[in-house]
Amino acid sequence: MDKVAKRNQKWALAILAFFVVISVSTFAYNEYYIYLSVYLWFGLIYGLCLQYGRFCFSSAFRDLFAVGVVRMAVGITIAIALFALVAALVTASGLSTFHPAPSSIHAVIAGAIFGAGMVFAGGCASGSLYKSGEGNMNAMLVVLSISVTQALFVGVGGWTNKLVPESWHHSALEKGLPASINVTDGWMDQYLAGYVWDQPVTTFAKMMGWVNDSFLGAFMGNFIIGVVLPSALLLALVYYIWSRKPYIRKQVKLGKTNITFVDHIKGYWSMLVASKRTAIAGLILGVAAGLHMLVLQGVRVKFGVKNAGTLLERMGFDFGLSVNGTVFDPGYWYVTTQEAQWVGWMIQKLGFENMDNIFFGYVNGIPNPAINPADWMSIATIGGAAIMALLYKEFKFKKPTLELATWAIIGGILMGIGARLALGCNIGAFFVRVANGDPSGWLFGIGMVPGAYITVKFFNWWTDRQMKKQLSASGL
Amino acid sequence: MKSTLWIVVVVTTFFTSFLLGYSLPPLIESGMIGKKTTQIGLKPKLDEKMKDYYRNLQNAE
C-alpha cells in the first residue's frame, strides 16, 4: 500500500472517530443530545452516499443537456423512487415527520432560478456540500455564497417593499403575527405571509380524496400516482430523446435488423441499470432518508417534544430560539436553511438585528451552530463525503480560478434566492417533497429544467466564445 | 482500503441501529407502532395519563 493511501485511511478513520466521540460524549453529558446525533449519523450516511454515487443535480442536468449522458438523471430518479417507497411505509404507519409545502407557480419560478444557479455554480446545494468534503474550494465558495445570500435575502427591506403587491401586504397584516415580527417591512416577509401561506397545501393522496396517512393514500396516492408513474414517464422520455438512438446503433452493430418494442423495453431497462455505483448510492440514500424520519419521530415521542427548540431550552440554550420557541428542525434531510442560519447567527453576533423577520424570528431561529441539529447534519454530510473521498483517493484541496470563483458566487446567489423562494433546495424542495407525494416538489423540478437548460446553452456559447478568442490570440 | 471502508460501514451501521433501537420503544409504547401486540398480552408500562399525553402529541399538529 502506498503512503498516500495509508495517510488517507488514517484521516478517514480520524474523521469517523471524531463523530463517534462527539456522539458518545454528548450523550454521556446529556441524553437530549441524542436528538442531534440522529441528524449527525444520517447526515454522515448522506455524505458517504452522495460522494460514492457522485450525486449531483447540476451534473444530472448538465450531462443530459450538454452531452446526452443520462446516468445521473436516472440515478436520481431511482433514489427518489426508493425513498418514496420507504416514505410511503413511514407515512402509512402515521410516523412521518414530513410537512407538504404550499403549491403554486412560485415553486416553478423558484426552481428556474435555482436550476440556473446550480449550473452556474457547477454543483447543486447537496452536490456543493459533498464536493466541499472532497476538498473542492470552489464548492466551499458556493456553500458560502448560498449561505450569505439566504441570510441577507430573508431580511431585505427598504426599496424592495415598493415591489410588494398591495394584496400581499394586506394579507400579511391579517395573519396577526407577533409584534416582534415586523411583517410590513421586508419583501420576503410579505411574500411568505401575504402570498405563499395562502397557497394550497396538499399531497397526491389528498388530491385523490384519500387520507394521507392511510395505506391507500400513502402507497396508491403518494407513491404510485405521485412518484412511480411520473418517474416512469420521465425516464421513458429520457430514453426516447437520449438513449434510444445509441441503443439501436448498438443492436444494429450486434447484427439485429428489426428493433421491436420488446427490444426497447430491454433498452429502457439497460439504461436504468447502467450505473451500478449511482444505483447503489440511490438505494442506500432512499432507505436512509426514510429511516431518518422514523427515528426522529421516535425520539420526539421519547422526549415529548415536537421541535428541538424545546430540548435546547431544557438544556439551557435559549439564545436564538424563534418567538415560538422553535428552531429549524425539519425531521428529514434538508440542506439550505441551516446554511442560512449559521450566517444569520454570525450577523446577530456582529450586532445586527435579524430576528424581526419571519424566516429567523418566527420559524427557524438562529441557534449557535454548535448546537443546531440541522447544522450537525450538514457537518456530518461534509465529513461523510470526506471519508469516502479519502478512501477512494479522490480527496484533494483544489483552488478555484478567478473565472470559476466568479461563477461559483453568481451560482450561489441564484441558488440562495431560489431556495428561499421555494422554501428549500434541490433536496428540501424537490427530492424530499416529490418522494413524499407533495406536488410542489414536481413544480420545483419542472422549474429547474428550463433554468438549467438555458444556463447549459449559455455555457456552451460562452466556452465557444472563449476558445475562439484564445485561438485568434494565438494566431491560429 | 477495503478494510477501512468496512470499519466505516460497521461503525455507521452500529450507531444508526442503536438510534433505531432507541427510537422504536417509545413509538411502540405510545401505540404508534404495533397496536395489535398490546392486545395479545404485552402491556406498556404507562399509566393512562402518560398514554393520553403521547396520543395528543401524535394528534396535535
Image (tube, grey):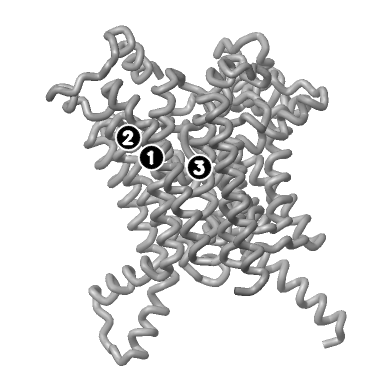
Rendered position, B34 above or below A228: above
Labels 2, 1: one chain: yes
Residue A349, numbered label:
none
Which dot, 1 or 3, sits closer to the camera? 3
In primary-sequence order, the first of circles 3 and 2 is 3
Q: Secondary structure at mark 1?
A: loop
Which residue is denoted by mark 1 in the rendering?
A: A436
Which dot, 2 or 1, sits closer to the camera? 2
In primary-sequence order, the first of circles 2 and 1 is 2
Chain under numbered label 1 = A
> Counting other residues with Cα less than 10 Å from the Cα at mark 3, is it few (<14), some (14-19), or many (20 or more)?
many
Task: State whether residue A109 appears in this view.
Answer: no
> Counting other residues with Cα less than 10 Å from the Cα at mark 1, is it few (<14), some (14-19), or many (20 or more)?
many
Dividing the picture into quadrants, the one containing residue A67 is bottom right
Amino acid type, mark 2: Thr
Q: Is residue A95 left or right of residue B3?
A: left
Dividing the picture into quadrants, the one containing residue A235 is bottom left
Q: Position of residue A90 (x, y in %)?
A: 32, 36
Distance from label 3 to label 2 (Cα)? 22 Å
Q: Is residue B43 left or right of residue A106?
A: left
Labels 3, 2: one chain: yes
Distance from label 1 to label 3 (Cα)? 22 Å
Amino acid type, mark 3: Trp
Q: Secondary structure at mark 2?
A: helix
Residue at figure coordinates x 43%, y 48% from the top left = B13
Q: Are marks 2 and 1 in contact (CB under 8 Å)?
A: yes
Most foreground residue, A311 or A153: A311
Q: Position of residue B27 (x, y in %)?
A: 32, 26
Amino acid type, mark 1: Asn
Residue A41, numbered label:
3
